[in-house]
Amino acid sequence: MADLRADRTRPPQASPGIDDDDEPPEPPRLRALRRLVTLLTMTAIVGVAVVAGTLALRLSQPLTPPLSLEAVTAERIAAPPGETVTAAGAAPGALILVTRDGEGVERMRLYDAGTGELVRTVTIERAAR
């Protein structure tokens, strides 16, 4: 009798040739789905890396190309009498002055950077708010 009780407490024997670690083969659809998910994950990672790289590249560059004052060869620029210069800027081959007269009218004056001659004058009109 003691032998029968001992047999009941033993774990059942596995079938010969099958280990507990062996898993049944994956169905073909599940294998294809797993590959598609892996491909999608890799594509998302590459996409995020490209966007991050593009942002880093764009943000590391200056917004406008540097302008050297050595390009300005004019000795002097004459603003009209009675007007005050409120802003100044430069563009390739040109100097830009914004002036205001006694009546409050603002003008943008474009001067040639090489000769200092006035090229064009534009009146600035402020839009009513």
Image: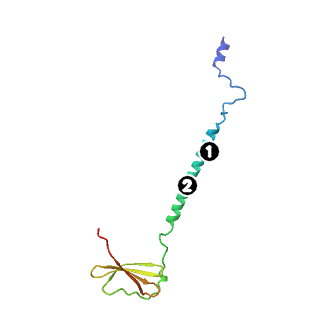
Query: Residue at the location (51% across, 65% down)?
Result: 58
Q: Quadrant of residue 96?
A: bottom left
Amino acid, disc 1: Arg
Q: Which residue is mark 1?
A: 35
Residue 126: horizontal and vertical position, in percent? 32, 73
26 vs 126, nearest the viewer: 126
Residue furthest out toward the right: 17
Q: Secondary structure at mark 1?
A: helix
Foreground residue among 107 and 1: 107
Categorize mark 2 by other alpha carbons within 10 Å: few (<14), some (14-19), many (20+): few
Q: Residue furthest top?
A: 1
Vertical comparison of 64 with 23: above or below: below
Q: Is residue 26 above or below residue 47?
A: above
75 sits to left or right of 54: left
- Residue name at image x 47 percent, y 72 percent: 64
- Quadrant that contains the C terminus: bottom left
The scheme the figure's colours follow is rainbow
Q: Which mark is residue 22?
A: none
Q: Secondary structure at mark 2?
A: helix
How many other residues sit within 10 Å of disc 1, few (<14), some (14-19) or many (≥20)?
A: few
How many labels sit on residues? 2
- Identify the residue at image location x=53%, y=64%: 57
- Would you say the residues marked 2 and 1 are in contact, meaning their CB atoms lie under 8 Å apart? no
Q: Position of residue 87 (x, y in %)?
A: 37, 78
The residue singled out by tag 2 in the image is 47
Residue 128: percent from left, percent from top = 29, 70
Percent position of residue 67, x then y: 48, 77
Nearest to N terminus: mark 2 or mark 1:
1
Residue type at numbered disc 2: Gly
Which quarter of the rendered picture does the N terminus lie within? top right
Seen in the picture, residue 42 relative to 74 is either above or below; the reply is above
**In whole angstroms, how far apart are the C-alphas of marks 2 and 1?**
18 Å
